[in-house]
Amino acid sequence: MLARIGRAALVPLWTVQLATAAKSFERNGVIGNRRLNERGLHAARVALAHRVAESRRRRLAGLVSAADRDAFARDGFVVRHDFLPRPAFAELVAQLEAYRGPLREIAEGDTIMRKIALDPHALAAMPGLQAVLRSPVWRGLIRYVGSRDAEPVVWIQSILRHAADGPPDPQTAFHADTFHPTVKAWLFLTDVAADAGPFTYVPGSHRLTPARLAWEREMSLGARGSANAEIRQGSLRIDRGGLAALGLAEPLAFAVPANTLVVADTFGFHARGPSAGRSLRVEVWAYGRRSPFVPWSALDLWTGAGLARRSLAGWRLGDFLDRAGVKPHPWRLRTGISAFDPA
Ligand SMILES: O=C(O)CCC(=O)C(=O)O
Ligand SMILES: [Fe+2]
């Protein structure tokens, strides 16, 4: 009874959240409501978010070349080999190899992910990063693909596969990150072999076809009660058979040399490819912050430094809550190691 009253009290908040990036079928009782989704609630959010994103993106078309626009429209990603001039790339890698500032680690199944926030200290130690962060190609592609004229959140990220005891890495299943177009970017700082956990993307799967929309609707019905935690949280999973049923192309694994940039819409289906043994992938990694329904493409007060401070503050708050016994903090502070060190 009390639980039911508690849930009823949350309905106004859940309803307001329909207009935001909220995506959890589990935490939000309106988003997860089967009857509403039978009537098309989830599908309507997906369709509207895509329409709004497309109109924002059209206004940002001037930030990228016509060839990149075509590649993105066709594939859902843009690739640039030899992104930085060779000497600038070598300098950046050397600076990161030498960097021993504080970083954070989290376990995702048996994968360990390491992140360095780009606060003023990290930026001062790695001036070579400016060649990336100020690059018109980097800036333009992230804004265009993300359909938002805003700074992304940027980290240095290391992916260490088969580095911990645990279940399989949940990111190795094909998935869409969320229900609306959104951007992630990888500038690989290590070579990535085909059997060493390459980022993998299903070309063309960013498009909201009638078949995809029908799939979204179908998935939304059972998502709240799914056995898969990521699906309950709004990141829908799909298997090979499902991809074929949607008429999609074969997944493409980005087995690429270091200094390759990939910018992708992660509404498209993607996964962290399998890794035969232990492996390490290091990258400059960015993601666009999400506001699916705002019609304007600009107006954003966050700077890169502000975003780095926000990441650091979030981690410190997590440490505090952990120490206070409220909630364990999965992001562990590590010092004295580099992005390239083994687990
Ligand atoms: O690390 C990868 O290759 C992909 C991970 C992923 O699914 C993501 O970053 O959204
Ligand atoms: Fe993902």
Image (cartoon, rainbow, N blue to C red):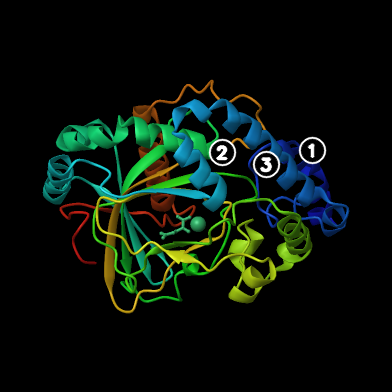
Neighbourhood count class around disc 2 (C-alpha, 10 Å): few under 14, some 14–19, many 20 upward? some
Q: Amino acid at mark 1?
A: Pro
Instruction: Give the residue displayed 84% in from the left and 51% down from the top.
Output: 40
Please state which of the two labelled residues, at mark 1 or mark 2, is closer to the viewer: 2
* Callout 3: SS: helix
Asked if marks 1 and 2 touch (Cβ < 8 Å), the reply is no
Q: Residue furthest bottom?
A: 276
Instruction: Give the residue displayed 73% in from the left and 63% down from the top.
Output: 219
Residue 56 on image: x %, y %: 61, 30
Residue 100 on image: x %, y %: 15, 48
Residue 137: quadrant of the picture: top left
Q: CA distance from mark 1 to mark 2?
A: 22 Å
The numbered dot on residue 12 is: 1
Q: CA distance from mark 3 to mark 2?
A: 13 Å
Residue 45 on image: x %, y %: 74, 44
Specify the quarter for ligand 1: bottom left
Neighbourhood count class around disc 1 (C-alpha, 10 Å): few under 14, some 14–19, many 20 upward? few
Depth check, front residue: 245 or 130: 245
Q: Is residue 137 visible?
A: yes
Disc 2 target residue = 290
Whether ligand 2 has any atom under 8 Å from the Cβ at mark 1 is answered as: no
Q: Is residue 30 visible?
A: no
Q: Quick one: label 1 or label 3, which is nearer the N terminus? A: 1
Quick check: 87 above or below 255?
A: above
Quick check: 211 above or below 142?
A: below
Disc 3 target residue = 50
Depth check, front residue: 307 or 218: 218
* Left or right: 262, with 247 as reference point: left
* Left or right: 168, with 192 as reference point: right
